[in-house]
Image (cartoon, helix red, strand yellow):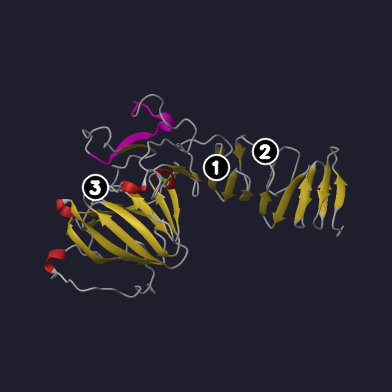
Amino acid sequence: MDKHELKVPCSDGKEVTVIGKLVTVTGKLVTVTGKFMTVNGKLLTVTGKLVTLTGKLLTRDSDWQVGDSDWQVGDRLTVTGKFVTVTGKFVTVTGKFVTVTDKLVSVTSKLPRASDKFVVLSEGIYLSGFGSELATEALEGALPEGQNSPQVCPYGLYAEQLSGTAFTAPREANKRAWLYRIRPSVVHKPFVASSSKHNLDYDFDSRHPNPNQLRWKPFSLPSARTTWVEGLHTVCGAGDPKSRHGVAIHVYLCNTSMVDSAFCNADGDLLIVPQQGTLHLTTEFGLLKVGVGEIVVVQQGMRFAVEVSGAARGYVLEVYDAHFVLPNLGPIGANGLANPRDFLAPVAAYEDRDVPFTIIQKYQVLFLY
């Protein structure tokens, strides 16, 4: 049974073609211990406990056997095992972390509810449009119909609005987002000033102006465990976040992911430019993967956490006045420079975990916990 190709009839009359080494047929189930096989014309790759399906059919049980109960495109899938990857346009499952790119996916034996303890993640799936009005939901039916804040939200969620401008701002300038949370954001203990030392410095008036040209070598990466927040260092700036006027330029140097914690900057928007290493941002709006050659903007008041898989370094531009906008086109015409469709926003995602969690709040230069 070590031939290049072997055809084995199943008990239900269907034919299985094996391109790998060994196949065992027991009743209606087919177990593969080699590497490659096809089931009903669909290519299947089996490597350890990782199953990759490049067609449209997928079935699974605790032993990763292939039966005749097939998952079709658009169906809801209940995953009871651990490692499944579908390389079409469907789902990725690793443990109880689920990514969905099309239809609803659950990791329990019933349809998901906001009270179930599982995670729906969606890194790598985005909506496009700078400054667009976007709507996305992690669970089907989670967004209220026809109103922003009903007395009872779907799934028992709590409606909250994050304001990016005064609520009386003209429509063309008004910025706000409605979020529907498992737990209200106000259920936290009072913030207190942190006694930990940080490396952000906004005392620009105490420095004498220097008209000379300046440059610096790349900042040294830390040897000790350092998170993104701990690795922020101010390079230069002007103005004052207390007066809501000015900018600051920082660098970040980190090698450790933020665990059960998030950062919130109440002083302004952050534009993050990775120079080394990929950042994985978990935000209140969804997941973002930002690599070298890309930028990401986290606006004022948004909570986010940064995960890294190794040493990472880059720049941060902080603005106090207003939000970032695209530049005017001028004489180069309508299709020059960056287009709004080049900017991506994450789709909705959520975590349902009951664990101690720390919010690091930067408010008028102070770090509060």
The magenta stretch spans residue 152: yes
Residue denoted by label 3: 322
Residue type at the position of mark 1? Thr
Residue type at the position of mark 2? Trp
Alpha carbons under labels 1 and 3: distance apart: 34 Å
**Residue 198 to residue 9: above or below:** below
Residue denoted by label 1: 101
**Residue 68 to residue 205: above or below:** above
Q: Indicate which disc, 1 or 3, sits on the residue closer to the N terminus.
A: 1
Q: Nearer the viewer, residue 173 or 58?
A: 173
Q: Nearer the viewer, mark 1 or mark 3?
A: 3
Q: Nearer the viewer, mark 2 or mark 3?
A: 3
Report the number of discs: 3
Give coordinates of residue 237: x percent, y percent: 21, 62
Element class at badge 1: loop
**Residue 319 as seen in the image, left or right of residue 283:** left
State whether residue 212 appears in this view: yes
Give coordinates of residue 44: x percent, y percent: 73, 49
- Asked whether disc 1 touches disc 2, contact meaning CB atoms under 8 Å apart, the reply is no
- Asked whether disc 1 touches disc 3, contact meaning CB atoms under 8 Å apart, the reply is no
Work out which quarter of the rendered image holds the C terminus and state it: bottom left
Q: Which mark is residue 71?
A: 2
Element class at badge 3: loop
Q: Indicate which disc, 2 or 3, sits on the residue closer to the N terminus.
A: 2
State whether residue 353 appears in this view: no
Give coordinates of residue 255: x percent, y percent: 41, 67
Callout 2 environment at 10 Å: few (<14), some (14 to 19), or many (20+)? some
Give coordinates of residue 166: x percent, y percent: 21, 38
- Name the image quarter holding residue 103: top right
Magenta span of residues: 149-165
Q: Nearer the viewer, mark 1 or mark 2?
A: 1
